Image (cartoon, rainbow, N blue to C red):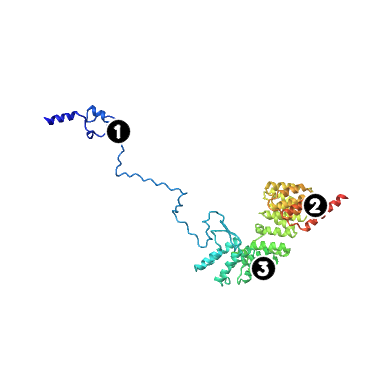
Amino acid sequence: MGFSSTTGSTAAAAPLPHMIPKPTHRHRYCNSRSSSTSPAAAVRWRPQLSRPPVPVPPQVLLPLRRPQQPSPANNPRPLPTKPSPRRPVVDAPDHSSHDDDDGDECSSSSSGRNVKNSSCTPTDVLRLMDVLQLPVDEDLYVSLIKECAEYRDAAQGARVCAHIRRSLPDLLRRPAGLHLANRLLFMFAACGQQHVARQLFDQMHFRDATSLAVVIAALSASGSHGDALRLFVEMCVRSGGRSPVLEPGVCWLEALVTVLRSCARTRELGFGRQVHGLAIKVLGGDDAVLLGDVGESLIQFYGRLGHHGSAVKLFEGTRSQSAAAWTCMISGYSREGRFKEAIGVFREMGRAGRRKNCHVFSSTLSACAKMGDGGWSGKQVHAAAIKLGTSSDGFVCSSLVDMYMKHELPTEAQRAFATMDGMRDCVCWKSLLIGYARSGCGMEAVKLLYEMKAAGINVQESIVHEAMTALDIVKQVQET
């Protein structure tokens, strides 16, 4: 039949392309399991050697890749993720828009001190409180007064005081405002405005021992030692026979130290002895007196007035011997002409393990300058100063120059003068000039005068006259 012949011939022929099975993983490299066994099919079919892509299940989601950040050079700076803290209203003008950092610090015209841009003055705080119509309590006033005292800002302190008088006119006249008034007194005294502190003290309707102690310290610092002593007597009368140290908030120990300093300056020996007896009565014996600053002040008081025996007794009974007490002992022996004892105190201080400062070396070198040993003891003290690193101090160098020149050692004096740090004072220049003149070094003295003029030192005629007189005396001695 026609149909059968056609079918047979078709079966014998090669299979059609759409009838070839698609390759799978099983028969990727071989076609032995193919449904067609015809050799022509095996020749025509070429397996795909590349691995087909694996289909992704619909439930698996690939992570999205983060887009690349743009270059900061071609794009503006991104906004911050967190908002910047709010700047206070009373801040100084913001200079962050400028590229340079030259305006990090600015000078306050009212106070004369350098403050940062982010800081504000007490006047700014009070102005802000006035604008917001908020009441200012006593604690805020105390904080502002403390800041003025810390920065020694008398102008701002005066404005705070004026604000107190304007907003609370009756506060300083009542007992409740005594604490604030004492704060104002201390602030003006710390800023060096002693006359303002005295005026405020005279206007106070209520005073206590603290007020008197602050004003006594201010008067003593300004040189009014007589007024300071009179106020101390008033302070003792106001105590009414009680122990004033037991009163809270009273700085009686500081008042005792200040009064002893004023007694030494005015040479009031009797008044100072009465203060010594009052200190023993109040503090409860000699041991308590010698523990703190009162004992050191008593040593200095007796030493300056020439009662070195009393100073030695107090020094030997003092447990906490500070550098000031040792310096006072060295100066006392040197004042009495006992230079060997003064140098002995210096050596005893080293054996006791006490640290020596520039004042100790300066007082010891002053004693060495008057010794007749040719500068041998002064060289030893100079070596100790080099070991402790105080040989370049201004006080020590001035004492070294004076000591070497008095022993006619100009080379060592010039060497000590060359090692001085910072600005050389007029005393050091004068010591070197007079030393050159006394040693007969006229050429060196003239050169030093030109160096003083080049350094900007105002050479007085008295100094030049003294140097020339000493040089003439030396020439006359050499001629004879």
Q: Is residue 70 left or right of residue 292?
A: left
Label 3, secondary structure: give it.
helix
* Identity, as a three-letter code, of the amino acid under mark 3: Leu
Give whichever of 176, 403 is nearer the camera: 403
Residue at 16% across, 29% down: 8
Q: Is residue 289 above or below residue 64?
A: below
* Identity, as a three-letter code, of the amino acid under mark 2: Ala
Label 1, secondary structure: give it.
loop
Where, by quadrant of the figure, is residue 100 drawn? Answer: bottom right
Give whichever of 253, 360 is nearer the camera: 360
Mark 2 or mark 3, which is nearer to you? 2
Residue at 14% across, 29% down: 5
Mark 2 or mark 1, which is nearer to you? 1
**Mark 1 → mark 3, Cα distance in angstroms:** 116 Å
Mark seen at residue 231: 3
Report x, y in % for residue 411: 76, 47
Counting residues from the start of the chain, the first of labels 1 and 3 encountered is 1
Label 2, secondary structure: give it.
helix
Counting residues from the start of the chain, the first of labels 2 and 1 encountered is 1
Where, by quadrant of the figure, is residue 212 drawn? Answer: bottom right
Residue 177 in view of the camera: no
Q: Are marks 1 and 3 in contact (CB under 8 Å)?
A: no
**Mark 2 → mark 1, Cα distance in angstroms:** 115 Å
Q: Quadrant of the N terminus?
A: top left
Few, some or many residues within 10 Å of mark 3 (<14, 14–19, 20+)? some
Q: Which residue is mark 2?
A: 437
* Identity, as a three-letter code, of the amino acid under mark 1: Gln
Few, some or many residues within 10 Å of mark 1 (<14, 14–19, 20+)? few
Q: Is residue 102 above or below residue 172?
A: above
Q: Which residue is mark 1?
A: 48
**Mark 2 → mark 3, Cα distance in angstroms:** 50 Å
Q: Is residue 43 above or below residue 201?
A: above
